[in-house]
Image (cartoon, rainbow, N blue to C red):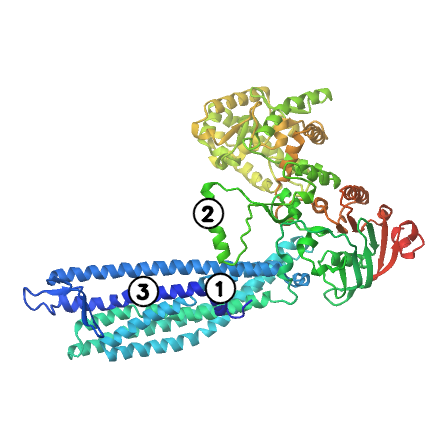
Amino acid sequence: MEKGLTHYIWTHTRKQQLWILLIVALSMIPYFMSFDLPKQIVNGPIQGQGFEGEAARQLFMRIEFALPFFGNVVFFPGIELNRLQMLMALSLVFLGLVVINGLFKLYINTYKGRLGERLLRRIRFELVDRVLRFPPSKFKRMKGAEIASMVKDEVEPLGGFTGDAFVAPALLGGQAATALFFIFVQNVWLGMIAGIIVAVQAVLIPRMRRRLLVLGRERQLTARELAGRVSEIVDGIGTIHAYDTSNLERADVAARLGRIFKIRYDLYQWKFLVKFINNFLASVTPFLFYSIGGYLALQGRLDIGQLVAVIAAYKDLPGPLKELIDWDQARQDVQVKYTQVVEQFKTDNLIDPALQVVSVDEPQRLDGPLSAFNLTLTDDSGAPTLEHVSIQFAPGEFTAIIGGAAAGGEALAEAIGRTVWPESGRISAGSTDLFDLPESVTGRRITYVASDAYFFFGSLRDNLLYGLKHAPLRDAEYDDAHIGMRKWEIDEAKAAGNPDFDIHSDWIDYEAAGATGPDDLFHSVAAVLDCVYLTKDILELALRSTIDPAAHEQLATHIVALRQTFREELEKAGLGNLVVPFEPDRYNVEATLGENLLFGNAIDEELMGRGIGRNKYFIDVVTRNGLDRTLYEMGYEIAENAVELFAGLPPDHPFFQQLTFMTADDIPHYQQLLQKLKGKDYSEVSDEDGRDIIRLSFAYIEPRHRFGLLSDELMTKIVEARRQFHEGMPEEMTGAFERYDPDTYTASASIMDNVLFGRVSHRQADGPERVRAMVISLLSEPGLFDQVLSIGLEFNLGPGGRRITQVQRQKLNLARALLRRSDFYVFNRPLPALDSRTQEQICQNALTLVRNNGQESAIVWVLSNTSLTDLFDRVLIFDKGRLVGDGKHADLADNATFKELVS
């Protein structure tokens, strides 16, 4: 990258800068005319110069020039106007000049803004592009949050300065010079006064602002370090809680914030001191104009029109001058920021851009062996992790690597995966050095997987297919309304030096997954999910998901029809009482009282949770049926029983898991509330306290809590209140509430709840597990299974895939690798979190899947479970960074290291 920001800006925006400078030069003409016009108005029509007689008239807008060889040439003879007409004409011209100057400023500022945003886009893209080309060792010494802070925040001022880099000094300097020149023309002494003040400001203020640049640099560095530290806290929150170091982190953050505060406070002191001095100097000049200019006017050496014009011109001088000084500070400030960013992104051994050029063509197969010659690897401290190893992996060969911790096998796998670079020696694919091959070859023909899987924020499907997205293979289709917008986006991308790839195109390489297109891709996906035993997990995610029936009409219809099938299966298994269905005219004893009363789900946030208790219509229905007092008494008794039973238990006691209507933190609140309400009638209770008590009754389930509070009479009243609630529901509430309907899919409920359309009985301890297994079995029928699994694939993994377990992440990581058809698969202990039995099953499945993919692919697998070596064609044994064994499983029986590892 360019070391100087000004040179960088000029290199990439030369044509645009020259154009806007031309516009700035043209804008000086009406700007100067607007200075001279007030003098003409004051001296002419207002004071009467040239209008001494009543019938006196003057020519308006006469355009005449003295040209060489031609003499005086009149281009426009002008219009004769009297004194009043001349006043109005000149005033209209002044108004026109104001409009013209305003339009010039509008165009210049808009153009500058667009120019600045383009360059900011260019800078940010170049920085991210460099990150993508950093050598692997660079990432071990940098914090992601600091890099993100630099790309997002620290280069932001550079974009704002780009438009002003050449335009601002030209425009502001031109305006200031025009105003100063005009003052000199009117009176030399007043011009000298203004010039001296301007010189003092131009010399003194920049010198004082140098301290601001130093403080600004310190503020930038400390803020960047704070961002990196906060990122570390987020990533290491488990370690912090495990070792009780949260207060240490608080102390560290407080110290950093204290340092930032001191820097910012010093910055503000200097900033406002400089501002005070600058404003003082700007205010002294009018004082000198009024005093000295007034004296000259009294002496007759300066007319009133000139004095008014000088004062009017000076009003336009401090603004451009101040902005010009600010521009100089901004220039130095952004230069410091730019230099710091360039230093952070400057590194040796950047990956050659030619190795990352996009390729839409299928790369040629690696038919030759993968070989290492005298390979030596080191860690960041310089200690060798692999020493002088020479080895060869033949196409189609399945090789297992075993060894103890840091034995060298993992390092070899990392080198083949290009996540570490050789210290000496080389790795070649056929006769070509592996590190000279473009990533379009190595990134497709070699698949590398380690245990530390990373998943991007997005759906499970996006992350599973991530390894297939190398290039935009099929263009996105746009309607007529969006074609113009897409063309504009392409033009802007090219103008900013960005690639014009369309992120909305289809980037998936279906052939690499053994598919012909999106229609049969699911078969390949299902195969790899079965291979790593992840299908059931994804189905579980799908069962807990909600769908839009309009977008998945066929699936919603299937699930509604499945309700009856599910009931029949329960009856066949003799489990008819395991799930109690929702029925419009019956109370569901396995559901909460609130569910029975509402018989549906609130969609509007104002009606969710405690919001329904504040709804006037709902309160009216409950009161009209006499349920308000009954539910209050019921809630009061629940509170008494809960406080009596659980008040003395610690907050983490397992009994609280059964207490659905109250948490351990609520116990003290209800203890105080019971004391407050003791002996009071319901009519004496405040609305807020009444809602707190009635809320408890809404979560009550008789078979689960067994307080004996639910009578047949109460259940009948609740069902009647439910009927009235739905029949008389106001129109404005209709769209905010979704009623349970046996023949309609409930969009606000999960797929599992829609299949059950009821509640599992609390009388059987293993009821939920048996129901879940039965539902999964029903959803596994052809056609329906694919749709449900597809819903599970839409589950959002969260940042870094943290919403799924470590075991699931490792399974998904291996599935993502197996989905691709590659020539070499390198698996570097991919499943350490799994038990030995599951590792063995997945390993067998993976070997079978690769063996049958028709590619004659090779596998290099660094094993966590050394007992699996008999599954491979060849076994390599590493110890202390050296290769100490190489052969078939049966041939290594006498190897001492092998015996030690497999025993």
**Whole-percent x, y for residue 806 in the image:** 71, 47
Q: Is residue 850 left or right of residue 898?
A: left
Identify the residue shown where x is 54% and y is 65%: 258
Q: Residues within 10 Å of mark 3 (few under 14, many from 20)?
A: many
Disc 3 target residue: 27
- The extreme left residue here reads 54
Question: Is residue 118 in sight in this rendering?
Answer: yes
Disc 2 target residue: 485
Disc 1 target residue: 12
Q: Is residue 554 left or right of residue 686?
A: right
Q: Is residue 94 left or right of residue 464?
A: left
Per the model, the C-alpha gap separating discs 2 and 3 is 32 Å
Identify the residue shown where x is 70% and y is 39%: 524
Q: Are marks 3 and 1 in contact (CB under 8 Å)?
A: no
Mark 3, secondary structure of its residue: helix
Question: Split into 4 quadrants, where in the image is the N terminus?
Answer: bottom right
Name the one closer to the observer, 694 or 874: 874
Per the model, the C-alpha gap separating discs 3 and 1 is 25 Å
- The extreme front residue here reads 69
